[in-house]
Amino acid sequence: MSMKFNPKFLMALLGAVIIFNCKNNQPTNGKPNIVTTTTMITDLVKNIGGDKINVQGLMGSGVDPHLFKASEGDVSKLANADIIFYGGLHLEGKLVEVFEKMSRQNIKTIAVSDALDKTTLIASELFPGNYDPHIWFNIDYWIQITQYVADQLSKTDPENKLFYETNANNYIEKLEVLKKEITATIQTLPKEKRILVTAHDAFSYFGKAYDFEVVGLQGLSTATEAGVQDVQKLATFIIDKKVKAIFVESSVPKRTIEALQAAVTSKGHDVSIGGTLYSDALGNAGSMEGTYIGMFRYNVNTIVNALK
Ligand SMILES: [Zn+2]
């Protein structure tokens, strides 16, 4: 007897596939599902996890983590995660409640800033007990975080522990090379010219680690807008210190820095816009600035060339 085509069976099968896909929109290839927040963390986790994990980053290039809110689609990605890696220290200020909800659902919700000794961090002047969350701008911190992320992946997926550790070690070597390279580039800029004026306070760790005086027009979070007084005060500072250039940030509207430039001009002085720095988000995927290492190199070259 020949097999007869059974449409009922086919429909049932199709229905099951559709239901399965709706319930879990993550790839179901047996690999751990990792959800990350900022592009810096996404890049790091991909470097360590390679093809052994599925990585979904919530934020794209140019996205400001201080203001980012989770969409329904984001929440469903988070709900299906094995691990959520985020920055912490209130970087993702509008996601705290979502993370708390996920951790109640027994999803591993890991702040990469937990890798660091809090006593070494820069404390917030405005909010006691809080710290500056822009930790990726100290390469030594990023090295510690690389190790921490590898350890967390190994705990979740012990079978591939060696793979994660090898990748982490290789990546740490690249970060060490980056550190030497940018330190040498910065050395070419005389110390009195190392004044970095940007849209918000993202570069304090950078300044501390690599010997720059750093001033942001807005505070640690972009959620608070700069006032007219802040702009006037900073304009005077720029004139007094003979700062040649100030910088736009890719994740902050240009108008803040343009207002500052206009204030300097109105006092009869000149300051140029030295370029766009990648502060709280990397550049487009596939470009040099689309990786952490490329972003760092690009920022340092842009800063040094404009201030020379
Ligand atoms: Zn920021």
Image (cartoon, rainbow, N blue to C red):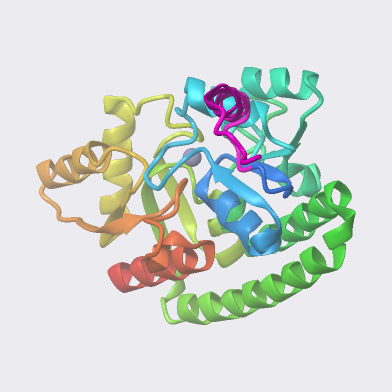
The magenta-colored residue range is 1-27
The outermost residue toward the front is 1
Task: Determine if the magenta segment contains residue 25.
Answer: yes
Is there any visible trace of residue 206 in the rendered image? yes
Task: Give the left or right position of residue 69, taking residue 237 as reference.
Answer: right
Res 79 quadrant in image: top right
At which x and y percent is residue 266? 11, 41
Is there any visible trace of residue 70 in the rendered image? no
* Quarter occupied by the N terminus: top right
At which x and y percent is residue 38? 53, 43
Of residues 5 and 211, which is closer to you in this image? 5
At which x and y percent is residue 223? 43, 25
Task: Give the left or right position of residue 70, taking residue 151 as reference.
Answer: left
187 relative to 275, above or below: below
Res 50 quadrant in image: bottom right
At which x and y percent is residue 285? 41, 58
Task: Determine if the magenta segment contains residue 17.
Answer: yes
Q: Residue at x 43, y 47 (%)?
A: 215
Q: Please, what is the dominant secondary structure of the magenta stretch? A: helix
203 relative to 251, above or below: below
